[in-house]
Amino acid sequence: MKQEFWVTNISPRNVTLADLATNIPAYSIVNLLDSKHYSLTLEQLQKSQISGSLFNKRNRIVVRKDAPPIEKKNIPININSAIPSRQRSLFVINKTEYDELKVADNEEIERILEEELAREHAELDDPTEPIIKKDK
């Protein structure tokens, strides 16, 4: 059977246990004998609880007698479906079209550019009009 030593940080700040070289995050419950995260022994923890950091900071760190209850989430799953039954996204994408942003076909664009170019050259080719026009 695995040994457990649960502590709860009841303060809004992270608490450092200097003699254990450990930080306990704010409002969290931690198993200090968890070998995945800590390398502490039960003797170290008991000494700290009697006269070390756990004793000095007993107003912020509380030693739990029992492990915290684990909430099991019941998620409905349809085994027969090939695709998950939930939506992929909460957002709905609306596709709106704006007339101003529509681009004409290439042929129409080329025709318009040729007409503008022809108008510009027609003005330059006409020798009867003065190059600089004066307002009256």
Image: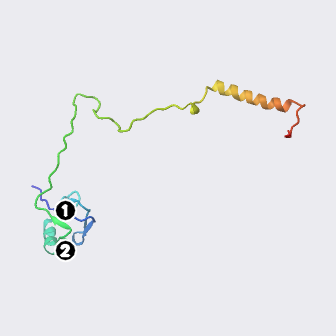
Q: Is 134 in front, or is 104?
A: 134
Identify the residue at the far left of this view: 1
Position in image of residue 92 (x %, y %): 39, 35
Position in image of residue 47 (x %, y %): 14, 72
Within 10 Å of disc 1 (Cα), the crowding (few <14, some 14-19, many 20+) is some
Indicate how the structure is coloured in the image.
rainbow
Mark 2 is on which residue type? Answer: Asn
- Quarter where residue 133 is shown: top right
- In this rendering, position of residue 4 left or right of residue 83: left
Give the total of numbered labels: 2
The residue that appears at 51% across and 31% down in the rendered structure is: 97
Mark 1 is on which residue type? Answer: Thr
Q: Which residue is mark 2?
A: 56
Identify the residue at the far right of this view: 128
The residue that appears at 25% across and 28% down in the rendered structure is: 81
Q: Which quarter shows the C terminus?
A: top right
- Quarter where residue 15 is shown: bottom left
Is residue 31 shown above or below 47? above
Q: Is 5 in front, or is 2?
A: 5
The residue that appears at 16% across and 50% down in the rendered structure is: 70
- Quarter where residue 38 is shown: bottom left
Question: Which is nearer the N-term, disc 1 or disc 2?
Answer: 1
The residue that appears at 17% across and 63% down in the rendered structure is: 7
Q: How far is mark 1 from mark 2, CA to CA?
A: 15 Å
- In this rendering, position of residue 7 left or right of residue 92: left
Within 10 Å of disc 2 (Cα), the crowding (few <14, some 14-19, many 20+) is some
Question: Answer yes or no: do the residues labelled 1 and 2 have beta carbons within 8 Å?
Answer: no
Q: Which residue is mark 1?
A: 8
Position in image of residue 75 (x %, y %): 21, 39
